[in-house]
Amino acid sequence: MADKTIAVILVGGPTTGTRFRPLTLNVPKPLFPLAGKPMVHHPIHACQQIPNLVNVFVIGFFEEKEFTPFISSLSAELRVPIRYLREDKSHGSAGGLYHFRNTILQDDPDHIFVINCDVCSTFPLAPMLDSHKKHGGVGTLLCRKVAPDTASDFGELVADSETKEILHYAEKPETFVSDRINCGVYVFRPAIMDMIKAAIAEGDGENYVRLDQHVFSKQAGKKQLYAFETDDFWEQIKTPGLALRCSQLYLTYYRQTSPQLLAPSTPGGPAIIGDCFIHPSAKVHPTAKVGPNVSIASNVRIGAGVRLKDCIILDEVEVKENAIVVSSVVGWKSVVGPWGRVQGSGDLKSRLGITILGEDVAVGKEAVVVNCIVLPHKSLNTSVQEEIIL
């Protein structure tokens, strides 16, 4: 009988994702669209490649009403049972698994994938599972080589070059340990629950337990954890600037996985440059120029002569004639006036490296907005640069 596998997607809750404001004032971070699809859609979609997948669980402490409609439609689309399990509070990545252990183990799975929602990746789950089965340990961690000066931003691990056993694990160490980092994607055997139970006991019975800090660091070097290294793209989606970068990575990846989602350049239509997503309900003027790396959501109106590049345009936005939007996120129901300019410098890791317009922001005629964060319901009739507008 074939092994049964389930997947768990960790989405956190409203106290996380604060660096995503003002965008998370309108939508939970996991539902923010990257390349036209909610952030959490991408790892769930990747779960389709797992053989004998019997269930997908989404664990977090957002209100159920915020996730239920999305999960219902995605479950129908992918033809995979998906269920949202709401925590009463944050229990940590390991504590959340243990809190719902009876539900997670009810189908007697042989393998459990655990994926953090806020990572952008190709999610090589099938080859990762094959590797996991071969070494026979309790867990396998997806890892990647990074520049040594950035490694300390993540969990660092040292693995045996031949067996791939993880010999040492340190979460965001103060001194350099390794240029291999934890990518937030794991596959476990059910025995992981026993490891989490032991970690809870060591923490005086507190149920807030993290996989990285409380489990991996303790189990490294005991022939229980192994590494699966990827050379594919990977990013952690910490900020709106990195969301722009991740949207670009997913748009490019659509060429391999979902070419039908990419906007075609057609005679008599707008000029499409590179990889772009345009929702079918959006109306884009034939004289507009779009791309590369542009994602246009539902019911958007793009006027004559508009130039869009490296941007995410959210639902019901209007960009009027001859306006320019570059390196920016334009929030729901916002309006960019004629000859207006909304742009960022493109420094995706800087807080003011892109421009972010919250919901229902109006940029007036000929106004220029550069490297700004604008909270919802503001009107800008004069030009502004490098400001946070409350």
Image (tube, grey):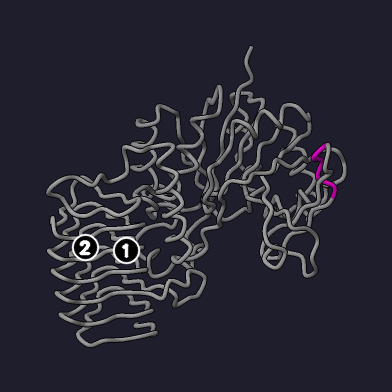
Nearer to the camera, 138 or 147: 147
- Which residue is the extreme one toward the top? 1
- Residue marked by disc 1: 309
Q: Nearer the viewer, mark 1 or mark 2?
A: 1
- Residue marked by disc 2: 317
Mark 1 and mark 2 in contact? Answer it, CB < 8 Å: no
From this view, report whether residue 105 is shown above or below residue 227. above
Q: Amino acid at mark 1?
A: Lys
Q: Quadrant where the N terminus lies?
A: top right
Spot occupied by residue 111 in the image (x, y as percentages of width and height): 65, 29
Is 110 magenta? The answer is no
Q: Element under label 1?
A: strand
Q: Amino acid at mark 2?
A: Val
> How many residues crowd mark 2 within 10 Å: few (<14), some (14–19), many (20+)?
many
> How many residues crowd mark 1 within 10 Å: few (<14), some (14–19), many (20+)?
many
- Which residue is the extreme one toward the right? 222
Spot occupied by residue 207 in the image (x, y as percentages of width and height): 68, 52
Nearer to the camera, 147 or 211: 147
Q: Main secondary structure of the magenta part?
A: loop
User: Residue at 46% of width from left, 52% of height from top?
Assistant: 249
Q: Quadrant where the C terminus lies?
A: bottom left
Q: Element under label 2?
A: loop
From this view, report whether residue 257 is shown above or below residue 156. above
What segment is highlighted magenta in the picture?
Answer: 163-167
